[in-house]
Amino acid sequence: MLAWVRAGTDADEPDLFEVLRMQDPDWLATRLAELAAADPSLAERLLAEAEDGQALEDVAGLRAELDEVLDELEDEASSLGLHDEWYPDGEALDELLDEAAEFVPDAPDAVQELADHVITRAERLLNYENCYGEGITEALEKAQDVHLAACEAGTPDLEALAQRLGTGALESGWGVFRDGPAKYARVLGAAGLARYRELLTNVPARQHGPDALWTSLHRAEKAHAADGGGVR
């Protein structure tokens, strides 16, 4: 019986992706162009996805530049003495975040991740006790604005976003995502707001900040209901 079953097994088909990835790139580009020439909708899709790929590459390069600036700032902070006052210059961060905002229409999910990364690192800089001035706090605010715009334009995981907004607001000493539910209500939708409510319900009563977050959540839920259930 087993021999009969094995004899009737179909031979494995070659994996198309594995075959194509071994071909010459110029040959692949030529064949795709030939196929697309006879199918305008395919040509449009290929062009759109190729442009998105360039945007993702540009965002990756921008993140590397941001990390370089952030590394330099952190090196400055760690080199100072305990009683030294440090007034970091956030101009370079502001300019790079402005550039990141320009990529929101083409690569929103990548920009969201980049902005989240900058938020985390900016908070770390502000946690140095000798950090003064408004340079980093202004960059932190701008990173949050970019994050919101990217979430509105992209397709974030709603439960993961609710988790990030909730834990960020609860754990931050710098007001990060302090009005998250209200600002992100249309993005979170019913599922995201429900997840946020679940997070707040499980927060110990002694933990700082829940009252303000509950207020923001109630505002968000009211706005969501008034909007007829939101867009998501």
Image: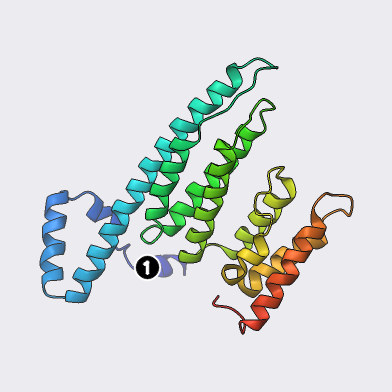
Q: Is residue 111 left or right of residue 196?
A: left
Q: Residue at x 68, y 43 (%)?
A: 174
130 vs 80: above or below: below
Q: Residue at x 56, y 52 (%)?
A: 144
> In the orientation shown, which residue stands out farthest toward the right?
206
Coloring scheme used: rainbow
Q: Residue at x 37, y 68 (%)?
A: 9
41 vs 30: above or below: below
Res. 178 visible in picture: yes
Q: Whole-percent x and y of residue 62? A: 38, 42
Amino acid under disc 1: Thr
Q: Is residue 215 left or right of residue 91?
A: right
Q: Is residue 209 left or right of residue 69?
A: right
- Location of mark 1 (residue): 9
- Along the line of sight, the residue nearer the viewer: 16 or 197: 197
Label 1: how many Cα within 10 Å (few below 14, some 14–19, many 20+) = few
> In the orientation shown, which residue stands out farthest toward the front?
133
Q: Quadrant of the C terminus?
A: bottom right
- Along the line of sight, the residue nearer the viewer: 93 or 134: 134
Q: Residue at x 55, y 26 (%)?
A: 74
Q: Is residue 209 left or right of residue 38?
A: right
Q: Whole-percent x and y of residue 212? A: 78, 59
